[in-house]
Image (cartoon, rainbow, N blue to C red):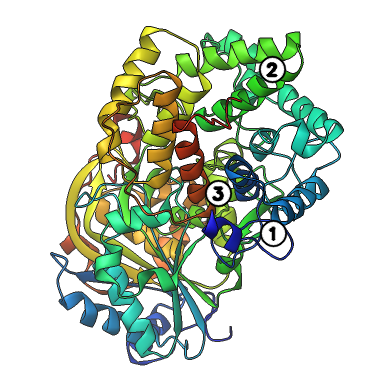
Amino acid sequence: MSGLNRREFLTGSAAGLVLAGCVRRKAVPCEKLVSVVRRPDYTQELYSDLRRILSEYRLDVRGKRVLLKPNLVEFEPGSPINTHPLLVHAALEAFRELGADVMIGEGPGHRRNTLDMAEAAGYFETIPKFEEIFTDLNLDRATEVRLAHPQSRLQSIYLAQSAMSCDLLVSMPKMKTHHWVGATLSMKNLFGTVSGGVYGWPKNILHWAGIPGCIADLYKTLPAHFAIVDGIVGMEGNGPIQGTAKRAGVVVAGRDLAAVDASCCQIMGIDPHKIEYLKLAVGDVQGLVGSIHQIGEPVESVRTRFDLLPEWSGLRQS
Amino acid sequence: MFSLLESQNPDGGWPYQLGGPSWTEPTAYALLAIRAQESVSEPVAMGLRWLIAAQRPDGGWAPQAAVRQSAWVTAVVALLGPAQLGGDAYRRGIGWIVRESGEETSFLSRVQRLLTGTSQTAPGWPWFPGTSAWVTPTALSMLALRKAAQCAESGRIRARLHMGAACLLQHACSDGGWNYGAARALDFDSHSYPETTGVALLALTGKDSPVVRKACRWAQAQLPKCRTSEGESWLRLGLLAHGQLPSHAPPPARPQRTVQNAALALLASDAIEGRNSFLE
């Protein structure tokens, strides 16, 4: 899909301002635009937020297949464990207004009754005809994909066909701490595209192959990305399942998942340079962070320190 | 029954969801459930042909035809027994299950655990080769081997069943049932789930221990508030296996959203009526 390559430069008014700024700085690459939107609660304003965010990126999605990939983990309605359905519906409406053919798909990591979980999380109530546009990625046709330069121990991996064949994969995670990798955001959320029907519940092969390396491999392997992170109410402590609610009051979005995740880390009070999967995915995290151009709220104004397990205290931003 | 027959693909296999590609697991469960109901010759024959053609040279089955690796679904297929699969295909399938175990109990991992002072665990079965043992594939493999042991006496099968039971008992959670894996992670207790607790109880049929009794109490408490059809079915099957299914248990209430869940609901109903396809 031309026009959606995450490496390409952006056009448009907002990006134009950024580019103009970059010209003056010359040495700084300027392809990493990240939107930080303050939104204290799950309210109807999310619909205009999402429309505005997408307009900032001038996504050419008319007639294209867009797959929204939220994070569904557990049967805990009202808890901060799943991506909020209102945010997903707002994204669905915003992409539809741009003329996209929008589907929703998810392949949870350890509970296998995905539709039951979506129902418990409020997706049926919030999103009209949800079942008609939803694909359980764990039970979708599995496609073996060779990994070009794997960072994990895997040489190939079975992924959901719907995730591989869409024109734009929109990762919509919950902003959470994670007991194995420090933070789980838009890149880690890509685990939901790995076939549970092949690997089982949990997808333990990703643990044996090295979780950070697998995250980096998926980031490089899956088609064009976009990220919309639900940081309105996230999870701190023993995430991604047994943590506690943490209100950060933000939606973070952008074309480059690594740039979005690095920005989320900064918001959470985590040093992105210390996140192993970011290092594996982009190599030069310092360069990545230096190239990020935030629009909307400055990170400092929305920074919300997420509690970390003692094992991860070394990730704290100094 | 009607929905199972309607959802069969033209190639003879069953999808998880209507219109999807054929997968091994729903095909095996659908055949098991249909067989338990009554003879429906042509769909069963088509399904068995699909399954037998999908058997891999190593004796196991892959989850989907395009997958180049035998995995946990072999145990579900083996539940069909030699009369359905044919003696040779069945023996090779059972042979694959007997050879498979979680990577944490491989020779190398055992040596590593010895050197690092980590406690050893009894071998169970993984979802996918080269990974750790988990509750569900361990329970399913034990059910398949229990059936195989009824057909022919084998010391290796008996030994694997004994070790599989030890593995399950080691992994029971403090709240009473089974999580999908470890009972604790990073000093936090794992929570039990209905699906895993039910299938583990079924695999531990005939075993009486404080762990099993506690799990039955947990399962009884969960039955009225279970949120999935799969959980309702496994809880019923597990409790029934220990004579602990309450006579006043509420009827299944959750929608069956996959072929596998529809088949499991039928199998649970049949078991309650005296035809338990997992144990006979």
Chain to which the residue tagged by mark 3 belongs: A
Q: Which mark is residue A196?
A: 3
Q: Which amino acid does the dot numbered 2 rest on?
A: Gln
Expressed as whole percent of the image width and height from the top left, the position of residue A194 reads 56, 53
Q: Which amino acid does the dot numbered 1 rest on?
A: Val
Left or right? Give the position of B24 relative to A23: right
Front residue of this view, candidates A132 and A241: A132
Q: Nearer the viewer, mark 3 or mark 1?
A: 3
Quadrant for residue B100, please give it.
top right
Chain to which the residue tagged by mark 1 belongs: A
Q: Which residue is mark 1?
A: A145
Residue B127's place in the image compared with A148, above or below, is: above
Front residue of this view, candidates A298 and B149: B149
Q: Which amino acid does the dot numbered 3 rest on?
A: Gly
Q: Which residue is mark 2?
A: B150
Residue at (19%, 52%) from the top-left corner? A78
Residue at (60%, 72%) from the top-left corner? A165
Left or right? Give the position of A233 relative to B263: left
Cα–Cα span, label 3 and label 2: 32 Å
Q: Earlier in the sequence, mark 3 or mark 1?
A: 1
Q: Nearer the viewer, mark 3 or mark 2?
A: 2
Label 2: element kind: helix
Cα–Cα span, label 2 and label 1: 42 Å
Label 3: element kind: helix
* Residue B7 seen in the current view: no
Expressed as whole percent of the image width and height from the top left, the position of residue A30 reads 44, 76
Left or right? Give the position of A115 relative to B23: left
Picture quarter with the C terminus of chain B = top right
Expressed as whole percent of the image width and height from the top left, the position of residue A204 reads 55, 38
